[in-house]
Image: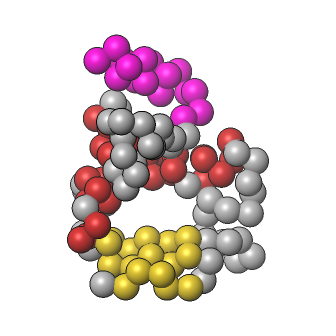
């Protein structure tokens, strides 16, 4: 609860927040990092803000201008999801909702 309150205060103060994970720790195993979207929304972000935190904002804070958004000349990874993640970001937590993953222009997952 204290972390959630700190997150809300930072968000309200306009602090730049990028998606991050401690993936690989005992309670945060690989493949579960999409839970972060749900937690960000619960703490006050809109789904769009949470998705932006994981894409263009994360690229910006990591000084990676060649990634983070869909634009000509940029390297893009795209995930196509069954359902509307703007209505429910939890859709990203279930691999069965992922229809396609395109990485660097090549389809790497197709369901």
Task: Name above or below for residue 29 compared with residue 81.
Answer: above
Residue drawn 36% across the image and 36% down it: 26
In this rendering, position of residue 94 left or right of residue 49: left
In x, y percent, where is residue 1? 28, 18
Q: In which quarter of the image is residue 40?
A: top left
**Left or right, 24 with reference to 86:** right
Foreground residue, 6 or 94?
A: 94
Up/down of 75 relative to 60, above or below = below
Asked whether 93 or 9 is in front, the reply is: 93
Q: Which residue is drawn at 74% across and 63% down?
A: 66
Q: Is residue 14 magenta?
A: yes
Residue at x 56%, y 85% (from the top left corner): 106
Say whether residue 34 is visible. Answer: no
**Place of residue 95 in the rendered image (x, y in percent of width and height, measured from the top left):** 28, 67
The magenta stretch spans which residues?
1-17
Measured as percent of width and height from the top left, residue 16 is found at: 59, 33
Q: Residue sitting at 47 percent across and 27 percent down?
A: 11
Q: Main secondary structure of the magenta part?
A: helix
Q: Where is residue 97 in the image (x, y as percent from the top left)?
A: 26, 70
Quarter of image, res 75: bottom right
How was this image coloured?
secondary structure
């Amino acid at each position: 609860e204290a972390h959630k309150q700190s997150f809300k205060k930072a968000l309200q103060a306009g602090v730049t927040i990028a998606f991050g994970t401690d993936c690989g720790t005992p309670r945060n195993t690989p493949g579960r990092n999409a839970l972060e979207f749900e937690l960000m929304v619960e703490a006050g972000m809109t789904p769009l803000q949470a998705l932006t935190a994981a894409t263009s904002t994360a690229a910006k804070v990591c000084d990676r201008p060649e990634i983070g958004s869909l634009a000509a000349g940029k390297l893009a990874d795209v995930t196509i999801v069954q359902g509307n993640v703007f209505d429910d970001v939890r859709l990203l937590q279930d691999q069965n909702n992922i229809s396609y993953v395109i990485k660097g222009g090549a389809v790497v997952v197709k369901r």
